[in-house]
Image (spheres, grey):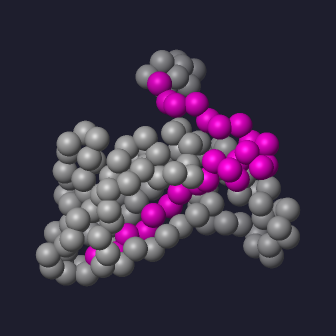
């Protein structure tokens, strides 16, 4: 995913002639969500192999991240970071009861990679991690 998103970003900067020496992330898209309910959803534009990076910020909130397909709930306090495959896992954040909640969601879109001719990365596997990082 790192390589595919990095390649896509470099090509977009070059093709669009954006006067940017670098883009500060491997992700092509970012959303800022402030004090909002995030209804149950799966992310439609990403590939199943893309991981979204969600950064929970703010002050004094008690937000919970629900992974609905897993019937799981996690604390989503300020300073929490989550990587999840938003296309594959239904997720939501219900109404907070106190404080100020800010989330920066980083994501990539499969159509951008297709347009640029960049192959979709495969899902990571335990065998792949062992061979790549420990057995070299």
Answer whether residue 56 is magenta in the image. Answer: no
Q: Position of residue 24 (x, y in %)?
A: 61, 66
**Can you say which quadrant of the picture contains the C terminus?**
top right
Q: Which residue lies at the image location 77% right of the left edge and 49% below the top edge? A: 115
Q: Is residue 82 above or below residue 20?
A: above
Provide residue 47's location: percent of width, then percent of height: 56, 43
Residue 9: % across, % down: 71, 57
At 68% across and 50% down in the image, what residue appears? 111
Left/right placement of residue 26 relative to residue 35 reads right
Q: Image quadrant of residue 81?
A: bottom left
Count of marks placed on residues:
0
Kindly indicate the quadrant of the structure image that contains residue 122. Answer: top right
What residue range appears in magenta? Answer: 101-125
Q: Is residue 6 left or right of residue 29?
A: right
Q: Is residue 120 magenta?
A: yes
106 vs 125: above or below? below
Residue 76 can be seen in this image: no
Q: Nearer the viewer, residue 82 or 47?
A: 47
């Amino acid at each position: 995913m790192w390589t595919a998103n990095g390649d896509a970003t470099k090509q977009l900067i070059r093709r669009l002639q954006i006067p940017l020496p670098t883009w500060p992330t491997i992700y092509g898209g970012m959303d800022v969500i402030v004090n909002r309910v995030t209804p149950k959803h799966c992310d439609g534009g990403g590939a199943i192999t893309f991981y979204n990076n969600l950064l929970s910020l703010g002050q004094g909130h008690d937000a919970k991240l629900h992974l609905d397909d897993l019937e799981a709930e996690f604390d989503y306090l300020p300073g929490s970071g989550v990587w999840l495959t938003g296309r594959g896992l239904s997720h939501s954040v219900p109404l907070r009861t106190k404080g100020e909640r800010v989330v920066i969601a980083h994501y990539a879109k499969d159509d951008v990679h297709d347009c640029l001719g960049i192959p979709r990365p495969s899902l990571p596997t335990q065998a792949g991690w062992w061979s790549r990082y420990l057995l070299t």
